[in-house]
Amino acid sequence: MPPIQDMTSAAPSSGKTSSGLPDDARLLDALQHQVAVFARRAEQTRLGGLGQVRNSMDRAAYLLLNRLDQEGPMGVKALAAGMGIDSSTVTRQVAPLVDTGLVKRTSHPEDGRAVVLQLSSRGQSRLEEVRASRRELMAQVTNGWSEDERDAFTTLLTRFNTSLSVRQAGAQSAEVPEAPGTPGPADGSDGSDGSDGSDGSDGPDASGRSGGSETPEAGNGGTPPAPGE
């Protein structure tokens, strides 16, 4: 009996010409296939790190903490704009981070009346733990790659994610505007509850779960994770 081929990892054969597709179309077919394979592999292996901190922080929490670490304290609206999601989604996602002490609310350094979100010392420590774990995982996955190959892959993946973000932003701006005089949400957001899957991620989640409905930590004193990138 001939061996069974793993169809989840085999890209569409470029040798098939019966469809009459030009080379660029076949290349795009191969690209979308590999993106689908990546999403499945990420879900199966749950690329959330190694060791005790593996999968201990969900995607939404990681992206929020990482943004605050890179950009410094900022308000909800600024954080939402930087991540390409609406304010109501950020408010919902940041609440458990505040409750577990990873993020703290503080006064704006230049405007004492405004409140900004800031990474706490505990949040900084947890973020570094998760980063180190994920860094080691990436080292193992790309073992045997040259530094140039890693750099090229990171550059292209960043460009791919940026293109997805731009496309999503364009789709949102093209939505039909509300009729004049229609009252909007009281918090100034666009009223989205994140149900469209927008959670600040720029691509397939490494764990295969939706970041918007998960809690920030599991197995480290935080609340248990929601059933599961």
Image (cartoon, rainbow, N blue to C red):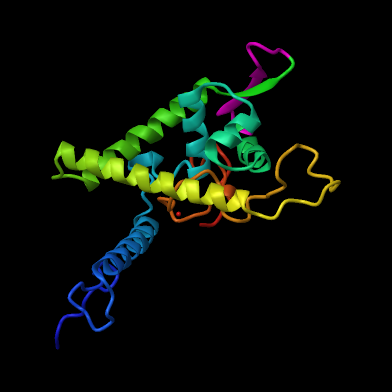
Is 105 inside the magenta-drawn segment? Answer: yes
Q: Position of residue 113 (x, y in %)?
A: 74, 16
Q: Residue at x 32, y 64 (%)?
A: 28
Specify the quadrant that holds the N terminus: bottom left
Specify the quadrant that holds the C terminus: bottom left
Would you say 97 lies left or right of 191 here? left
Boundaries of the magenta span: 99-112
Q: Position of residue 81 (x, y in %)?
A: 58, 35
Give the camera-side residue of 10 and 44.
Answer: 10
Is residue 159 something one can see in this rendering? yes
Outermost residue, bottom side: 1
Would you say 108 lies left or right of 28 here? right
Give the camera-side residue of 206 and 148.
Answer: 148
Q: Position of residue 195 (x, y in %)?
A: 63, 55
Task: Determine the image quadrant of residue 9.
Answer: bottom left
Would you say 137 lies left or right of 15 here? right
Q: Is residue 8 above or below residue 45?
A: below
Q: Is residue 181 above or below residue 74?
A: below
Q: Is residue 48 above or below residue 64?
A: below
Q: Position of residue 111 (x, y in %)?
A: 69, 13
Q: How many marks?
A: 0
Q: Residue at x 68, y 50 (%)?
A: 193
Q: Residue at x 25, y 45 (%)?
A: 153
Task: Determine the image quadrant of residue 99.
Answer: top right
Is residue 58 something one can see in this rendering? no
